[in-house]
């Protein structure tokens, strides 16, 4: 299985202006990440290596969450990530006709969103889009009959898309480029710009571009789970943590956007109001959950 992954392992290309890089989960823990418990917010706990002291199982009441260090220097440093430590977390899902290989990347912080509003190409939306911890993934679908890569799923915020293998940008043989959007880390098979939102030139920018900020997942990966082979894979303790990897956002989306909108002419303010309605659908309000809480961990990509 590992040889199969190495044959197709993607290169993750960060945007040249990316300020929030990926890291390993252990780097996040060892550099001051904190575990909070509802009712005991004044007494956060440092997370042990591997996440051995994280609570296990479900958390429907939202009793636990993770956050950055409390001091500003520590928060800023950890939020920038550490690409030198970054590694891919691999999950094998063998099936009847195909084997799906999920490849997860962890980012300590998701940066603020930028919008395009009519003729104004880049409008920073304050804190909108910011959240602690960001899990993004691709799924490689490989044909069992001949071991050929059939297509790849790229996660994009709360959704994603399937891309036929013929549309991938290959390099180093059968390995392909996985582009990560600036600040938001949404995945794509090619560089460019895609707007999420109401349309007509208005939307959240997803900017993809190649740079020298790159992670070779074939050289730096850990198999964290393999369906049907539980005894062969030692799952890291943090994988069993099913609570939030970040706090629920504390700002009001509409208020943040209104602060930006007061500098825009009338027609563009109306366009911005339409964008507010879809922002929470794109980014959500709660802190993100880990890989094995996502529906695609056991189900299909939708």
Image: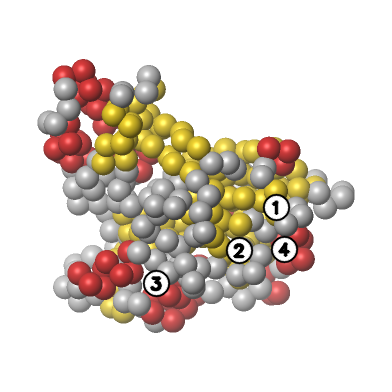
Under circle 1, the secondary element is strand
Give whichever of discs 1 and 2 has the lower sequence position.
1
- 3D distance between C-alphas at marks 3 and 1: 30 Å
Residue toward you, 20 or 91? 20
Give the quarter of the image for residue 9: bottom right
- 3D distance between C-alphas at marks 3 and 2: 19 Å
Give whichever of discs 3 and 4 has the lower sequence position.
4
Mark 1: give few (<14), some (14-19) or many (20+) Cα within 10 Å.
Answer: few
Residue toward you, 121 or 165? 121
- The label shown at residue 6 is 4
Residue to which mark 2 is pinned: 216
Residue to which mark 3 is pinned: 28
Give whichever of discs 3 and 1 has the lower sequence position.
3
Which mark is nearer the camera, 1 or 4?
1
- 3D distance between C-alphas at marks 1 and 4: 13 Å
Q: Residue furthest right?
A: 145
Give how far across and how far down residue 157 sits, in percent: 44, 44
Give the quarter of the image for residue 262: top left
């Amino acid at each position: 299985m590992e040889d199969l992954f190495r044959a197709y392992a993607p290169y993750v290309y960060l945007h040249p202006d990316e300020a929030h890089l990926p890291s390993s989960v252990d780097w996040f823990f060892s550099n001051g990440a904190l575990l909070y418990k509802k009712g005991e917010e004044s007494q956060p706990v440092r997370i042990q290596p591997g996440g051995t002291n994280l609570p296990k199982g479900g958390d429907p009441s939202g009793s636990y969450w993770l956050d950055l260090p409390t001091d500003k220097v520590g928060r800023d440093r950890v939020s920038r990530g550490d690409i030198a430590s970054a590694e891919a977390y691999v999950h094998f899902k063998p099936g009847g006709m195909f084997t799906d290989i999920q490849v997860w990347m962890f980012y300590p912080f998701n940066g603020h969103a930028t919008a395009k509003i009519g003729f104004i190409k880049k409008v920073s939306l304050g804190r909108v889009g910011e959240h602690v911890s960001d899990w993004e993934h691709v799924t490689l679908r490989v044909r069992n009959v001949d071991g050929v890569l059939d297509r790849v799923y790229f996660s994009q915020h709360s959704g994603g898309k399937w891309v036929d293998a013929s549309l991938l940008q290959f390099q180093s043989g059968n390995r392909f480029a996985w582009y990560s959007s600036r600040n938001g880390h949404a995945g794509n098979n090619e560089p460019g710009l895609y707007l999420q939102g109401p349309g007509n030139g208005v939307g959240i920018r997803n900017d993809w571009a190649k740079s020298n900020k790159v992670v070779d997942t074939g050289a730096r990966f850990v198999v964290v789970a393999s369906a049907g082979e539980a005894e062969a894979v030692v799952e890291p303790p943090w994988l069993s943590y099913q609570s939030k990897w970040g706090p629920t956002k504390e700002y009001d989306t509409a208020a943040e956007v209104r602060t930006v909108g007061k500098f825009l002419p009338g027609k563009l303010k109306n366009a911005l109001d339409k964008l507010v309605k879809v922002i929470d659908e794109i980014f959500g309000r709660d802190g993100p959950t880990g890989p094995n809480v996502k529906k695609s961990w056991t189900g299909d990509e939708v």
